[in-house]
Image (tube, rainbow, N blue to C red):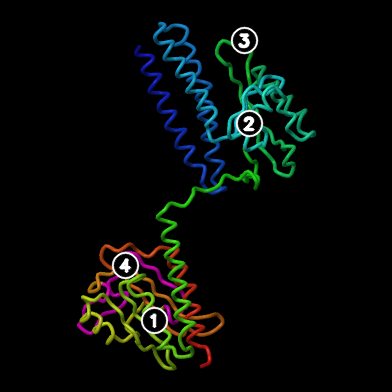
């Protein structure tokens, strides 16, 4: 019974690793060979250790254990079907005995149709003889083989076929386990595994961003253009509250930056007045954005003086309890920077994301166009 328990633990570990491999299907294409190699290793583990172990337990165990082992055998069959790698079990003449779900998607051939037919029939004619020869050699016990073939339905996509010997329990002849994978790490386009569906949270955030962009566009189109201060004031009103806790707008004049708008939480009026009186030239992030024209995204900013100090002498980021910020230059290439818009989030509010920074970058170009348009 101890042997059976140990086998059960080993099988449970295997099931857990297979689940991890299944979850890794969404890795970038360049990393896919590593995942596939790990899957092949796990299949070899089943063929070389778990299956012989199971045969031993089946032949020596009592009837009660045999009943449990039959359940384990069913589980192994289910794992074969669900493993996220295209796998086929063929005989020495390459006749298909089993084809898992991933293999049916990869080859475009239904398992019921493929079973009983040679796997070589689904390969390009030029590859059939070589594949048949290598499969026969593996079945004779001459070692594992690997070769590049082409599917008849996708002749332009090279496929790496790895063949290893497998002796199913109670059968006199050796079978061949065939693992298929794209040779150049590219899955055929019509068989590409779709990425995970967006969650409700992601969908809600995307909808909120679209609403924000719509509100900003409406504000810019419904008011006068060519007045930088007026345009920034309308934009700040759209962003304040729904997108950022603080909105600080600076306009680039002929000689220097000037602060035109500061919107803050309702309980921070005094802090807002101190920030409004601050010289933008004393804000390193603002100066850098005005000179370099690049957006700055900071989450839990380490430098407390990144936005300078207010008129009370306190670091603005510390006094406003800033947890994340966006500092966005307002420019429409080609052209100079029209101004700088800085957004703060504070307290328990979530940090700015890359998607939000990208949306803000798009809106900044629209703002710059509205600021520089002729009246």
Q: Earlier in the sequence, mark 3 or mark 1?
A: 3
Between marks 3 and 1, how big is the CA–CA gap?
79 Å
Does residue 299 belong to the magenta stretch?
yes
The local secondary structure at tag 2 comes to: strand
Q: Residue at x 45, y 86 (%)?
A: 223
Label 3 sits on residue:
172
Which residue occupies the foreground of this view, 53 or 170?
A: 170
Label 4 sits on residue:
301
Q: Residue at x 44, y 74 (%)?
A: 215
The local secondary structure at tag 3 comes to: loop
The local secondary structure at tag 4 comes to: loop
Q: Residues within 10 Å of mark 3 (few under 14, many from 20)?
A: few
Between marks 1 and 2, how big is the CA–CA gap?
59 Å
Label 2 sits on residue:
162
Between marks 3 and 2, how big is the CA–CA gap?
23 Å
Label 1 sits on residue:
287
Q: Nearer the viewer, mark 4 or mark 3?
A: 3
Q: Residues within 10 Å of mark 1 (few under 14, many from 20)?
A: some
**Residue 7 vs residue 114: left or right?**
left
Q: Residues within 10 Å of mark 2 (few under 14, many from 20)?
A: many
Q: Earlier in the sequence, mark 1 or mark 2?
A: 2
The spot of residue 135 in percent (x, y) is 69, 24
Looking at the rendering, the stretch of residues picked out in magenta corresponds to 289-317
Q: Nearer the viewer, mark 3 or mark 2?
A: 3
Residue 154: image tag: none
Q: Earlier in the sequence, mark 4 or mark 3?
A: 3
Q: Earlier in the sequence, mark 4 or mark 1?
A: 1
Magenta: main secondary structure equals: loop
Between marks 4 and 3, how big is the CA–CA gap?
68 Å
Which residue occupies the foreground of this view, 363 or 112?
A: 112
The spot of residue 96 in percent (x, y) is 67, 24
Q: Earlier in the sequence, mark 3 or mark 2?
A: 2
């Amino acid at each position: 019974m101890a042997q059976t328990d140990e086998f059960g633990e080993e099988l449970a570990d295997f099931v857990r690793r297979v689940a991890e491999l299944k979850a890794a299907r969404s890795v970038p294409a360049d990393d896919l060979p590593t995942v596939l190699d790990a899957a092949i290793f796990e299949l070899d583990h089943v063929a070389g250790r778990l299956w012989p172990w199971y045969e031993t337990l089946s032949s020596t165990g009592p009837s009660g254990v045999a009943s449990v082992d039959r359940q384990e055998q069913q589980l192994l069959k289910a794992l074969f079907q669900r493993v996220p790698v295209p796998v086929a079990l063929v005989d020495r003449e390459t006749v298909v005995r089993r084809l898992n779900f991933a293999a049916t998607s990869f080859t475009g051939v239904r398992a019921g149709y493929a079973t009983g037919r040679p796997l070589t029939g689904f390969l390009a004619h030029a590859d059939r003889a070589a594949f048949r020869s290598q499969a026969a050699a593996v079945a004779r016990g001459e070692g594992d083989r690997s070769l590049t073939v082409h599917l008849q339905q996708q002749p332009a996509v090279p496929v790496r076929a790895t063949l290893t010997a497998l002796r199913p329990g109670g059968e006199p002849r050796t079978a061949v386990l065939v693992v298929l994978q794209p040779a150049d790490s590219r899955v055929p386009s019509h068989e590409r595994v779709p990425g995970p569906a967006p969650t409700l949270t992601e969908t809600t955030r995307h909808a909120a961003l679209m609403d924000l962009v719509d509100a900003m566009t409406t504000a810019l189109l419904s008011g006068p253009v060519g007045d930088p201060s007026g345009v920034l004031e309308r934009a700040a009103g759209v962003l304040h509250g729904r997108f950022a806790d603080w909105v600080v707008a600076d306009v680039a004049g002929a000689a220097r930056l000037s602060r035109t708008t500061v919107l803050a939480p309702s309980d921070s009026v005094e802090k807002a007045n101190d920030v409004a009186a601050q010289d933008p030239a004393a804000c390193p992030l603002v100066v850098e954005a005005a000179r370099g024209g690049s957006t700055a995204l900071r989450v839990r900013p380490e430098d407390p003086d990144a936005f300078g100090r207010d008129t009370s002498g306190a670091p603005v980021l510390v006094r406003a309890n800033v947890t994340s910020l966006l500092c966005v230059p307002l420019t429409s290439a080609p052209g100079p920077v029209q101004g700088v818009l800085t957004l703060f989030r504070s307290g328990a509010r979530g940090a700015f994301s890359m998607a939000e920074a990208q949306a803000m970058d798009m809106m900044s170009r629209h703002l710059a166009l509205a600021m520089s348009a002729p009246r």
